[in-house]
Amino acid sequence: MPRLRRRQLMRREGTGKDSGTPPGRAGGVECEPGPRRRTRSLLRASWWRGRIGELTAWLEAVHARVETRFPVVTALVDRMVSVNIFDSATRIAAQCFLTAVPLLFVLSAYAPSAVQDQVSASIRAVFGLTGPAMAQVEQAFQPPSDDLRQATGLVGVLMVLLSATAVSRAVQRLCRRAWLLPRAGAKVAPWRWLAWIGLWLGALVVQGMLRNGFGLGAVLGFPVVLVMQTAMWWWTQHLLLGGAVRWAPLLPGAVITAIAVSVLSVTAHLYMPRALNRALADYGSAGSVFVLLSWLIVVCVAVAVGLSAGAVLSQEPFLRRRLGTPTSPPGETDHA
């Protein structure tokens, strides 16, 4: 009897030999401990696909809510992504740097001494250079020798100007992407690229005088430079877009870009002299190349953001009615 009672108890608990259900199983279904089951789930591709799908749906719902409440913010973000801000800015900065070096040789070889002095003063005024960095700039504008003129030559000057159009083309692509203009309808006019280069070379020559407020000091110089930058970026967009967008809608982008570049030029006086002198002392000319290229990338990012933001803001209802901006984008984004 005691043995029979023990067997009955073991059958009820489901742990006996005669119960037919081994330990760890309930009703024939294996029951794994909780941590082991979660570990196996994490190793399954289907589990990850499910989690990624849920995250994607959540992000799309958040984007839809933000777009409904803050349409300007989402339009700005979408335009920045379509323009590919950092890629465009890096390309423009690299082209500017590769163009500036041979242009300095051309100016040193053929430009009158008065123009060379103005360019040197402008570089010093823009970056606030002192010490070894300023000595490097002055050395670049030493009186040219016959060997330098022969090495440069007329053919070399023409090749430098033609290669400089790469900067114009890069800025043109940025403007077209900011305004969602299709590449198929782009007008190829090389004279526009050369005219843009000539404008900015002329602006470089007079930067020193403008920043000094024509001798009256930086208090007058900053608003003068701000107005000049606004006018130049306004004209830049109209010129490189080939008149595809009217003058008025281009104004917000010109103002935003001018403010961003002018503020960066003020901060350059605090950062660039020390950074360049330290780079020259530690790494020589290679260090100064890295510092200048890094600064150019920052400036070009500000330009790309300013032009893109201006294009988006000019299409908002408040400014669209006042500037006469078309109600829909002029075309599709150029992703090339």
Image: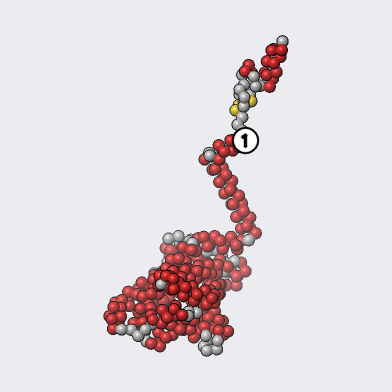
- In the image, 316 versus 56, the foreground residue is 56
Residue drawn at (57%, 44%), measured in percent from left and top?
Answer: 51
Using the rendered view, name the quadrant where residue 1 is placed: top right
Residue drawn at (50%, 69%), measured in percent from left and top?
Answer: 298
Q: Is residue 313 visible?
A: yes
Q: How is the image coloured?
A: secondary structure
Crowding at dot 1, Cα within 10 Å, few <14 / some 14-19 / many 20+, comes out as few
Q: How many marks?
A: 1
Q: Secondary structure at mark 1?
A: helix
Residue 237, position as x, y percentages in the image: 48, 72
- In the image, 113 versus 196, the foreground residue is 113
Vertical arrangement, residue 147 with respect to residue 275, above or below: below
Which residue type does callout 1 highlight?
Answer: Gly
Residue drawn at (48%, 79%), measured in percent from left and top?
Answer: 129
Q: Is residue 241 visible?
A: no
Left or right of 150: which side holds 224?
right
* Quadrant (top left/top right/bottom left/bottom right) for the C terminus: bottom left
- In the image, 255 versus 149, the foreground residue is 149
Residue drawn at (42%, 70%), measured in percent from left and top?
Answer: 283
Vertical arrangement, residue 259 with respect to residue 23, above or below: below
Vertical arrangement, residue 178 with respect to residue 130, above or below: above
Residue occupied by mark 1: 34
Vertical arrangement, residue 293 with respect to residue 45, above or below: below
Left or right of 2: which side holds 129?
left
- In the image, 335 versus 117, the foreground residue is 117
Using the rendered view, name the quadrant where residue 266 is placed: bottom right
Residue 159, position as x, y percentages in the image: 32, 74
Residue 242, position as x, y percentages in the image: 44, 72
